[in-house]
Amino acid sequence: MAQAEKGNTVTINFTGTLEDGTVFDSTLEDTECSEDECCDDGCEDGDECGCGGHENGPMTFVLGEEILFPQIDAAIIGMAPGEKKTVKIAAADAFGEYDKEKVFTVPRSELPEDLVPEVGDELSLSNEDDEELEVVVLETTEDQVTFDANHPLAGEDVTFEIELVSIQ
């Protein structure tokens, strides 16, 4: 039976979970995800989305292009269709450690007048060089807004259950 090699186009199913078992991403239609992870901004209006913005159904990509994580690519190399593996990835190698330096407060006077941020809002801020920074609103007061630029899964160890569906 064929085994996956770097450069092959492969199709996989996967489910990504946190240490407490919470599913944060999956290609499987019947996987329950946390409400705040499903149908995020990665989806087009009207699309059926899985967790983390993936459409339900297997994912196809070229092995070695690190579409997911290098640890997942490495695990798939040598697998045969139908084979399953579990890959655990430490926070530092996944979405990074939580960095308190990425939490910052901005005076409301420096924000656009029409911006009315609420706690939990996900925003894209840009600086004078038009560089964009994805943030989550942590706190708002009359005078200032506190943002967090860490990835939502920063500081989390993650586990991926992977099944190699096919090799093209």
Image (cartoon, rainbow, N blue to C red):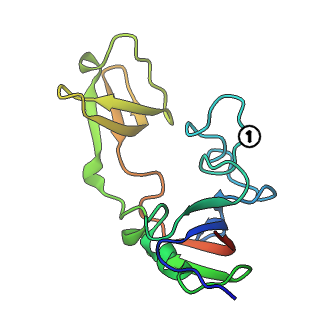
Identify which residue is drawn at 38% across, 32% down. Answer: 124
Residue placed most toward the observer, 108 or 86: 86
Work out whether residue 2 can be spotted: yes
Residue 29 horizontal/vertical position (percent) = 78, 55
Give percent across and percent down for residue 127. 22, 29
For the point 64% across and 82% down, the residue is 85
Q: Residue furthest right?
A: 30
Q: Give the image location of residue 66, x and y in percent.
A: 44, 65
What SS does tag 1 mark? loop
Kindly tell me whether residue 24 is visible in this rendering.
no
Residue, x 59% and y 50% (percent of image)?
A: 52
Residue 97 sits above or below residue 6 on the image: above
Q: Quadrant of the C terminus?
A: bottom right
- Residue nearest the observer in this picture, 39 or 143: 39
Q: Amino acid at mark 1?
A: Glu
In-front residue for pair 107/49: 49
What x and y, as percent, mark residue 74?
47, 80
Q: Measured along the vertical axis of the image, is residue 99 above or below residue 147?
A: below
Q: Is residue 26 above or below residue 20?
A: above
Residue 79 found in image quarter: bottom right
**Residue indicated by mark 1:** 48
Residue 150 relative to residue 118: left or right: left
